[in-house]
Amino acid sequence: MSADDTSLEATSTDATSKAGGSGRVVEVELAQGLGLMEALTIGVGTMIGAGIFVLPGFILTETGPAASVAFLLGGIVALLTALSTAEIATGMPKSGGGYYFVSRAFGPMWGAIIGWSTWFGLIFASAFYMMGFGEYVATFIGVSPSVLALGMTVGLTVLNITGSKGAGQAQNVIVGLLAVILFLFMGWSIPSADPTLVTRDFAPMGWGAVVGGTATLFVTYCGFAGIASMAEEIKEPAKNLPRALLGSVISVTILYVLLMLIVAALRPYSELGGSTIVADLAEELMGGWGRWMIMVGAIMATVSSANASIMAASRISFAMGRDRLIWGWINEVHPKFRVPHRAIAVTGVLTAAITFFGNIELLAEVSGFLHLVLYGLISIACVILRSADLDSYKPAFRVPLFPWLPIVGALVTFGVIFFMGPLTLIIGGGLVAFALLHYFVMGRRRTNLEGAWPFFLRNGVLEPALAQVEKWGAVEEELPTTMVPVANPEHEEARLHVAAAVMGPSKGRVLAVNVFRVPPDEDMSEDVFERYYQTIEQRNERLQAASKPVRDAGGEATSHVIISPSVFQALLSAAETSHSSLVILGWPQPGEGREKQMNLFDSLDGHLRSHLLVLRDHEPIPAPDILTIIDNSRHGDLALQAATRMTNQWNANLTVGTVLPEDAGQEHIDRVEEDLDRRIGDTVRATIRAIIAPSLVDAAHAEAPHYDMLVVGHGGVNEAADGIVVPLIDELDDITNCSMLIARAHEGLELQ
Amino acid sequence: MANQDNNGDRKTLLVGISNPDTAAHLIHLANVLAEYAQYNVVATHIVTAPPQVELSSMRGSREISEGRDVLMQVIEAGEQMGVEVRGVVEVARQVDEGLISAARNQDAEMLLVGFSERDAETGSERSFDRIMHRVARETESSLIIQKYRREIEDSILVTVATDANLEAVSLVVNALHAATGASVSYLHGVPIGADVDSLHRELTDMLEQYDLPFVEKLTVMPADSPIDAVIEEANRHDFTIVGAEPRPSLKESILGSWAERIGTQAESTVLVIRAKR
């Protein structure tokens, strides 16, 4: 699979209909196999790696008994990031990890930085785990740790390339065993603990050293954000994802802090150095079997964490490939093993090369540095994404005390970086510089990735600022306006619902207008209002009441009653003077007035300088299942945008389809689906369908029974006719079993 | 979903398809059940993804396209039999996870899967494997595992012990009887010395509650080894229907040792049925 092919990821399901009817459809669906416990285990398993077996000695020497505080601080930093991760992961339509979030918030340059940083972070983490493995195993087989680390790295790389399907499954067992081993060690040690060793001189090296310790140990918290990259596999992600993220960070923090308190109470801190201190203590307290137990735990933890890092690295490279921020060849999938073997091989080779640095503490710190950069940016991404007020961003979990908690999270996370050693900063900074260079030399020309940054500036910064200025009376801001002509407010609430939804994140204004027709010879001088005052007031009140859906959706609703002898003139001038970018009309009713209405629609189609939607509503509105059938015209774009906004506003299921002739080959179908996927982008979760039918009209008739609303955006069904709207109304008039929305986009007017 | 309204209150029968060759028997049985119980038939093919890639990155892959082809063949075979089949390619980490997830996503009333007699790679006789056990343990839908040996010509044997799965068994037996006209007999194997008459009375009462045909053809058979006697009897029939063990002990397979042995040793087609949870 090339990098280009993988862009089909934009939807949760895609489907191909080969014969039009509902019978011959093959859908693609992703299995959700992970419950809360499985997700929690993955989080805990990724974090408990070599770190907790290898680093306690280093941290205790560096900080004294306050090592537990260093671990606690690490846990707090991780928890703050986990909160933001949980919000973003439940708010994005697609599943993705930290790379995905940051690239969607900041755009391609930061995406490239974070993609490379995460990849390098995982490589350094793997190297660190492998060194830990080497150090532990070397104590009882007398081979150089570097050689052991290298051998294991090669083994894991080969295992991953040949597609180790069982590797993930062993995780549950390993995590369970690790917990048992660590708790057994702690339980056994408590009687020998002397609390005064902890309390007597708690932070002998000062609190600066404690934060420095956090910088070194942060690698023991790395990886929890990986749960977010599995969102698509988690059952009820809105509920289980935040629980798994926060739960895993909290339980691991408690475990680490307890362990450090107990270890610090066993010996004076000056005697607690070295990378195998936990095993040494276990041997002293429990005898030879204690050492073996810790050895087995450490080996399992290091191997499983390194394995998880190699897997995660291949996912990162895949994700970057999708955004064309990396060479396509690196992500090619092996024809037999179905894994991106080159990406895995590169990860393996770099890991092997780095293990020869040999300085285990440095490896831990560089990995921590790169992860901290990512985590800090995740917190900022949370602020940007929520404030950008995107249509597609509707988090089920929201960080409390917003925006302060994520801001504090980012500051604390970046703060920890400043306590890292100069060599770490040089290596980490160098890698970030490499990422930037690579982006400017290669990635910038190729990527289509766009971030939410501009929306953040507009909706999160500029608009609130303007609103403030407006409050002071300095500027009158103009909101995008949708005009809804309403004849009978009690019976046309559906269109106002649609208006409220289509208004979308811009929180624009909906103008409900009612034309009060007067005879052509009516005197239109000023006292006409006096004459009809009561009727106009009544109508205005009814319009205001009917506009409730708009206000409920957070929009501004205004109403006008226009007195005019001509409905056409009234609507045209109302649309012009209110600068309405969109007008939503109701479907012409059958009966006597129909021809007149069709003439009116034709005239509006020709003269209105706004986009136009025509709605025939049918229960239920809001519609739970929406199909939009679009072509490549601007009308298709408008229909897609309207359907997207309704889907997001109403939490509906959206299917986006395009009509293909019966002789369309699979390749053609695939290409069209891919194009649709690209047009939808990240804005909504939708099913994509190529609908095989002789024409749009046939497709609409065949599909309408399966949906609650059909949104049609097409360049025209009747080429002989001038307009778009009337021919479509004619052709689709007999579809009465679902709501119907026809979109006609005005040329030259940007879609908002 | 609107398309469910369109089809009234029909429930879904999900059929797990691994390859088109073995699919024909499953679709045939699905057709019989769908006609009798008015099910919508959905065929699913599981595509597995290695842990090194995201599930969604399998889109556009050769496996999914092959899965689509398999399901299109099944859909066409269904059309020829007069049954409308919908196809779903389920992308999962493992086959069992895919089947369980597809049954949940499709809100399936019943899940029908086939179990091949011999291992595709080694050619050796297989007992129900990890996949079947996990599906039986975790799916909420009622479950039918078909081990196909031959078509129904004239006789169906139903082994009975408890009423745990009888509602589902009754549906299958009635559907098969209605479609083929085959006779149905019931068998309960007991150790020698058991009170055959009172067991016969109890079991007859139980079967009558579930609206089963030919209840008079119930035999309570004493034997030194009841299970071997049941297998021997099963060999004289075309189809054997076995209920899964309702409360399997830890030592036994989740489907129960009887189901396991009859499924692997009988020469007739065997359906192991577990009721909906």
Image (cartoon, coloured by chain):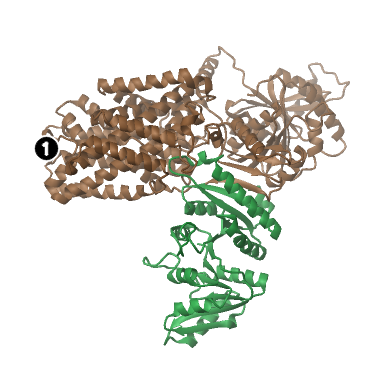
Chain colours: A brown, B green
Q: Is A684 placed left or right of A726 in the picture? A: left
- Percent position of residue A427, x then y: 31, 22
Residue drawn at x 62%, y 64% is B29
Mark 1, other Cα within 10 Å: few <14 / some 14–19 / many ≥20: some
- The chain ID associated with circle 1 is A
What kind of residue is marked 1?
Answer: Leu
Give the answer, above or below, for where B213 lies relative to A731: below
Q: Is A487 placed left or right of A341 in the picture? A: right
Q: Is B32 placed left or right of A115 in the picture? A: right
Number of marks present in the image shown = 1
Question: Residue A545: in sight, yes or no?
Answer: no
Q: Which residue is mark 1?
A: A197
User: What SS does tag 1 mark?
Assistant: helix
For residue A699, which quarter of the picture? top right
- Percent position of residue A657, x then y: 67, 38
Residue drawn at x 61%, y 80% is B214
